[in-house]
Amino acid sequence: MTSTIEELVAENTRLKAAAAAPIATSGVTVYIVAVVVLCMSTVAGVIALTIVRPTADNTPVITQLVGITIPIALALLGGALQQTRTALDGRLTQLLGFTAAAAHAEGKLEGTTSTPRVTIVQTDQVGPVVVGGTRSDDPKPPA
């Protein structure tokens, strides 16, 4: 499976562009509009109540209106949060896949354009050499 440099560059560019696309949040807009309409209707109800009954004590009725509005608004906002979370989770999974594919393409591209690097280590030490915390003549690897 031999790829040319141009194909690898094109694939890498395509994957990076796809990973940078914005997250679609159209489902959340419905919830936000519903919360705004609910709050506006509650305010309109309180104003209408104070206009219709200017001399009566409206506190219990206003408390009931607000008491009904708050849980409904919180439930709608919870739905919006769930929609956003679902969109983000799906997008993050897709982003991880794109990132892995782009890194793979960059690695292939770098492998075709660069020369391999070799590191030679010279020591004056006689006997076993310690590499990575283990001795080179140690019969058993560390656990």
Image (spheres, helix red, strand yellow):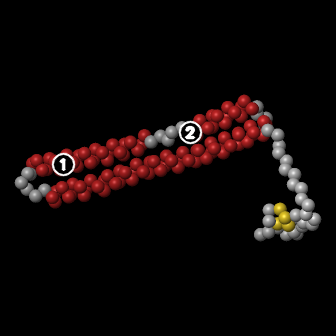
Identify the residue at the far front of this view: 124
2 or 1: tag closer to the N-terminus: 2
Identify the residue at the far left of this view: 55
At 79% from the left and 69% from the top, the residue drawn is 142
Residue 5 vertical placement versus 34 (above, below): above
Identify the residue at the far right of this view: 126
Between label 2 and label 1, give the one nearer the viewer.
Answer: 2
Residue 137 relative to residue 12: left or right: right
At 15% from the left and 58% from the top, the residue drawn is 59
Depth check: give the residue in front, 114 or 21: 114
Residue 103 relative to residue 112: left or right: left
Image location (x, y in percent) of residue 98: 62, 42
Depth check: give the residue in front, 122 or 80: 122
Image location (x, y in percent) of residue 134: 82, 66
Residue 32 vertical placement versus 17 (above, below): below
Whether tag 2 and tag 1 are in contact, CB under 8 A, the answer is no
* Tag of residue 45: 1
Residue 14 relative to residue 30: left or right: right
| Amino acid type, label 2 | Ala
| Distance from Cα at disc 2 to Cα at disc 1 | 45 Å
Location of residue 129 (image quadrant): bottom right
Which quarter of the image is occupied by the C terminus? bottom right
* Tag of residue 139: none
Residue 100 relative to residue 72: left or right: right
Image location (x, y in percent) of residue 19: 58, 40
Q: Residues within 10 Å of mark 1 (few under 14, many from 20)?
A: some
- Disc 2 designates what residue? 20
The number of callouts visible is: 2
Q: What element carries label 1?
A: helix
